[in-house]
Image (tube, rainbow, N blue to C red):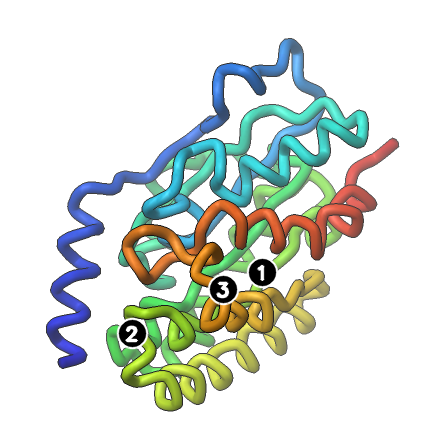
Amino acid sequence: MKHLYLLILLSISLSCSSTSNTTPPDNTVEDPKFSYLALGDSYTIGESVDPSERWPVQLAARLRQQNFNMAAPKIIAKTGWTTRNLLNGIENELDVQRDFDLVSVLIGVNNQYQGRSITEYEEELRQVFRKAINHSKRMEAGVFAVSIPDYGYTPFGSAHQEEISAELEEFNAVFKRVAEEFGVEYFNITPISREAQDNPDLVAPDGLHPSGLMYSQWVDLFANQVAEKLPK
């Protein structure tokens, strides 16, 4: 059954490409002062939600409300990506160092889903953080990590909830530890993701990914702390 789930995710990934400088027209900013790079997978690209509902786009909008003149986020992410795919995506799309005021990292669910080893995840995650820091104007002070959501609490994963949750706990423990070793702030949104079991409005129409409403709750959790990373 797990192989069937993988085929479904891979079929979704074929229709979703990495996206850069993404923002709805009504949020266009003239002469933006602050830039933002979002690195990840389907959760960062916002699979199955409107582009305006992607959490990096919502975060940028929230920061604008706090009088930070944010550019549209540059998003390097694709449904189905593992840490290795993300590393390749960064290499293909970026060549300038330390050019973003904010950099976010959310990666790992597909390492778990595809049965990749947690040792491999840790090794490649370290490379991801090095690259994230290299593309941050303020190095680690401008980078933040967002934990892996628990899709075991969605309709898609409910039949294997205990196994999925246990494995993601292990991956998130590594994610948090490595982030802390690099001096990167880590925000734990996983408890929010588990509320999807009791609130269908938190799940996108595909029954797997977060809805725009859930993404807004993530942003509620960390927007003020992320704002502190930007110079006044």
Q: Position of residue 164 (x, y in %)?
A: 37, 82
Neighbor class of circle 2 (other Cα within 10 Å; few <14, some 14-19, many 20+) is: some
23 vs 40, nearest the viewer: 23
Q: Are marks 2 and 1 in contact (CB under 8 Å)?
A: no
**Which residue is rendered at x = 67% and y = 26% of the image?**
70
Mark seen at residue 113: 2
17 relative to 6, above or below: above
Disc with the residue nearer the chain's start (2 vs 3):
2
Which sits earlier in the primary sequence, circle 1 or circle 3? 1
Question: Going 53% across and 76% down the picture, which residue do you hit?
Answer: 172
Q: Left or right: 223 with respect to 59?
A: right
Which three-letter amino acid code belongs to the residue tagged 1? Val
Place residue 206 in its image quadrant: bottom left
Q: Earlier in the sequence, mark 2 or mark 1?
A: 2
Q: Is residue 107 visible?
A: yes
Residue type marked 3: Asn
Which residue sits at x=18%, y=68%?
6
Kind of element beneath mark 3: loop
Q: From what the image shows, is residue 32 above or below residue 112?
A: above
* Front residue (pair 13, 159): 159
For marks 2 and 3, give the CA distance: 24 Å
- Residue pushed farthest top? 30
Q: Residue at x 28, y 69 (%)?
A: 156
Asked if residue 148 can be seen in this view, the reply is no
| Residue linked to disc 1 | 146
Q: Quadrant of the N terminus?
A: bottom left
How far across and down, in percent of the image, does residue 169 sit?
50, 83
Q: Is residue 231 left or right of residue 162?
A: right
Expressed as whole percent of the image width and height from the top left, the position of residue 183 reads 72, 64
For label 3, the residue is 199
Q: Between residue 200 and residue 209, name the one nearer to us.
A: 200
Helix, strand or loop for disc 2: helix
